[in-house]
Image (cartoon, coloured by chain):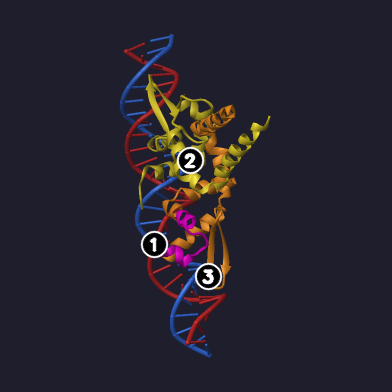
Chain colours: A yellow, B orange, C red, D blue
Amino acid sequence: MQADASDDVFKALADPSRRRLLDRLHATDGQSLGDLCAGLTMTRQAVAKHLAILEAANLVVSKRKGREKLHFINPIPIHEIAERWISKFDQPRLSALSALKRSLEGENHD
Amino acid sequence: MQADASDDVFKALADPSRRRLLDRLHATDGQSLGDLCAGLTMTRQAVAKHLAILEAANLVVSKRKGREKLHFINPIPIHEIAERWISKFDQPRLSALSALKRSLEGENHD
DNA sequence: ATAATAGGTAACCATTTGGTTGCTTGTTGC
DNA sequence: GCAACAAGCAACCAAATGGTTACCTATTAT
């Protein structure tokens, strides 16, 4: 129905293969397509499609370096989702933060 | 490939209609199927399917009350994703938390 | 120059997805 | 009891998704 930016992000994150690619980039940023294919069962073309979707969602940015295409993770969309959407539902997180604040304030006694 | 619990959650969150249903439940918890259909363009059956997916992902729990089925939001899966997955990528959030901790510790001076 | 390497494009395929319509079942109110 | 209301079930459908194979282009190394 709506086609805002966060929709692309949610859709991109929906696929486990794409989340694994993000994991790999988080472990080692700036990998080439070939690097990212290593050990995967699917074809290079399939991986390229997934990376294209991650790029369209702005979760990954890429730069052509010679004959290689290097991929870099972009944390901003995930951050925005965490801020604008998840915090709304994740009350425990907020209360945990309050709890931390209280516990730290309690540390004044020594 | 893997079919763990968080996979169902990510898939459930991928659809904008389902996110809207969660929004509505967040605004007013415990709504019936009929309530949740109000104002929507799709049919009751379509909404029921979406709710079934949300229930399968444990994002929503329901209870039959007479001839109505009441739906309640369950924040735990979202919390777990925030903790186990998003925080890994969302460095600003972590540093903001550290900043808070430091700023609160700095309040010891009075 | 040319072979090898890294990646891009395109057509195609099976399955999943998001939705519909039509009908059945369960629960209340009169 | 029975009409009206709330939800469930099932078949079906078009479009999107995730993947493949086959071939093309660009860059490097010898």
Give coordinates of residue B83: x percent, y percent.
57, 40
The lab-note entry on whether marks 3 and 2 share a chain reads no
| Residue occupying image coordinates x 52% and y 70% | B68
Q: On the picture, is A70 further left or further right than C24? A: left
Q: Nearer the viewer, mark 3 or mark 1?
A: 3
Query: In the rendered structure, does residue B33 fall within the stretch colored magenta?
Result: yes
From the image, tell me which residue sits under label 1. Answer: B42
| Residue occupying image coordinates x 52% and y 55% | B54
Q: Which residues are magenta?
A: B21-40
Query: Front-most of B63 and D24?
Result: B63
Q: Amino acid at mark 3?
A: Glu
Element assignment for label 1: loop
The lab-note entry on whether marks 2 and 1 share a chain reads no
Q: Main secondary structure of the magenta part?
A: helix
Q: Amino acid at mark 2?
A: Ala
Give coordinates of residue A43: x percent, y percent.
47, 34
Subunit ID for the residue under disc 1: B
From the image, tell me which residue sits under label 2. Answer: A82
Neighbour tally class for label 1: few under 14, some 14-19, many 20 plus, Cα within 10 Å: few
